[in-house]
Image (cartoon, grey):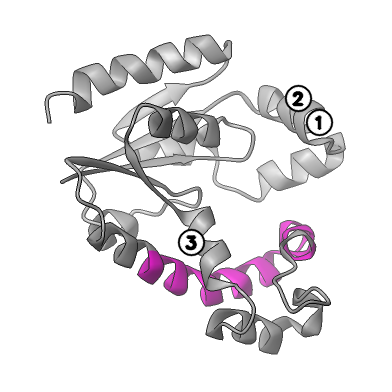
């Protein structure tokens, strides 16, 4: 099984690429979906988050208050570190378990917060980074998600830079054109780097 990670910052188009690959029939293991799974009500991970941050991490029904935590950690680096130290191990274990249940020649792993250690952790063959100029990412977040410019800027600033992602990647997808341009580039990558598998 060939394993390829897809990474990218907020507003880059990483999720669009992942969705397109899924539409082409490829198996996807998504870190965001893993986070949702490990923070369900009454899970050890959610209990650990409540111990670290208080009951505010939970909605009245006992589910994970992801929107609240997102606002908190994007403005507080210490809180972000504590969150990641609790969730990353659980997410990694969930993704590893998911990989074992997949029977496919190629699988893509969507990992927004990619680190070099993930290559060994998930036995990756390649890493593809989706990037775009910061001003385009801000525009997408403001127009597509209704964020303020200040909120968009702070969220982008809290993540790895394009340069850092490029340094960790084998393939770089520059998403600064239309969605058709993006699909065309991904389809060409699949044809040249994946189809032979």
Which label sits on residue 34?
Answer: 3
The 10 Å Cα crowd at callout 1, few under 14, some 14 to 19, many 20 or more, is some
Describe the element under mark 2 as helix, strand or loop.
helix
Which residues lie in the magenta part?
A: 68-94
Distance CA(mark 1)–CA(mark 3): 27 Å
Q: Nearer the viewer, mark 2 or mark 3?
A: 3
Q: Position of residue 191 (x, y in %)?
A: 23, 17
Distance CA(mark 2)–CA(mark 1): 5 Å
Q: Nearer the viewer, mark 1 or mark 3?
A: 3
Quadrant in the picture for residue 45:
bottom right
As drawn, 99 above or below 153: below
* Marks 2 and 1 in Cβ contact (< 8 Å): yes
Q: Position of residue 68 (x, y in %)?
A: 79, 64
Location of mark 2 (residue):
139
Residue extending farthest to the bottom is 51
As drawn, 168 above or below 172: below
The 10 Å Cα crowd at callout 3, few under 14, some 14 to 19, many 20 or more, is some
Q: Position of residue 46 (x, y in %)?
A: 62, 80
Q: Please state if 112 lies on the left or on the right of 28 as rendered.
A: right
């Amino acid at each position: 099984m060939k394993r390829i990670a897809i990474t990218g910052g907020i507003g880059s188009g990483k999720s669009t690429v992942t969705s397109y690959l899924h539409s082409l029939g490829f198996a996807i293991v998504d870190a965001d979906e893993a986070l949702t799974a490990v923070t369900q009500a009454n899970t050890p991970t959610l209990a650990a988050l409540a111990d670290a941050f208080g009951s505010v991490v939970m909605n009245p029904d006992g589910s994970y208050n992801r929107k609240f935590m997102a606002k908190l950690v994007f403005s507080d680096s210490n809180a972000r570190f504590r969150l990641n130290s609790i969730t990353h191990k659980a997410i990694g274990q969930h993704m590893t378990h998911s990989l074992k249940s997949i029977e496919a020649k190629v699988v893509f792993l969507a990992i927004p917060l990619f680190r070099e250690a993930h290559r060994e952790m998930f036995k990756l063959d390649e890493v593809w980074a989706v990037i775009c100029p910061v001003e385009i990412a801000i525009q997408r977040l403001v127009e597509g998600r209704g964020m303020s410019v200040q909120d968009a800027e702070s969220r982008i600033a809290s993540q790895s830079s394009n340069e850092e992602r490029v340094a960790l990647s084998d393939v770089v997808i520059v998403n600064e054109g239309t969605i058709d341009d993006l699909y065309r580039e991904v389809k060409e990558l699949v044809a040249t780097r994946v189809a032979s598998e």
